[in-house]
Amino acid sequence: MPRMLRFSIAVLILTVTFGMGRLAFGQAAQPQFPSQQPDPNARVISGNDVGFRVDRQQTETLGRLTGTWVVRVNGL
């Protein structure tokens, strides 16, 4: 088998393989990123000036407590 024909077949197989992988990835469900705005009804576990805002959706999804550290500025 000529060398150029083997090379062409190898390139064709790689092209089809990566093309099908890209097609399958495009059809798969993509992760939904949470909103950048905090939930105004979120519970805050707090001390005097430092707290932890619980992210209810991720906590329920992952099965462990998740959230964001928050700091009180000017009494807010």
Image (tube, helix red, strand yellow):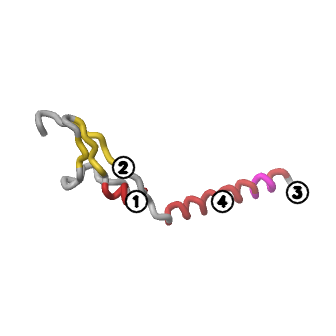
Residue found at x 86% / y 54%: 2
Q: Earlier in the sequence, mark 2 or mark 3?
A: 3
Q: Nearer the viewer, mark 4 or mark 1?
A: 1
Distance of label 4 from label 2 (alpha carbons): 39 Å
Q: Nearer the viewer, mark 1 or mark 3?
A: 1
Residue labelled with disc 1:
61
Residue labelled with disc 3:
1
- Main secondary structure along the magenta-highlighted residues: helix
Query: The residue under label 1 is which amino acid type?
Result: Thr
Choose between 2 and 23: the one closer to the eye: 23
Query: The residue under label 3 is which amino acid type?
Result: Met
Residue labelled with disc 4:
17
Residue labelled with disc 2:
66
Distance of label 3 from label 4 (alpha carbons): 23 Å
Q: Is residue 76 left or right of residue 63?
A: left
Asked if residue 6 is among those painted magenta in the image, a careful observer would answer yes
Query: The residue under label 4 is which amino acid type?
Result: Thr
Q: Nearer the viewer, mark 4 or mark 2?
A: 2
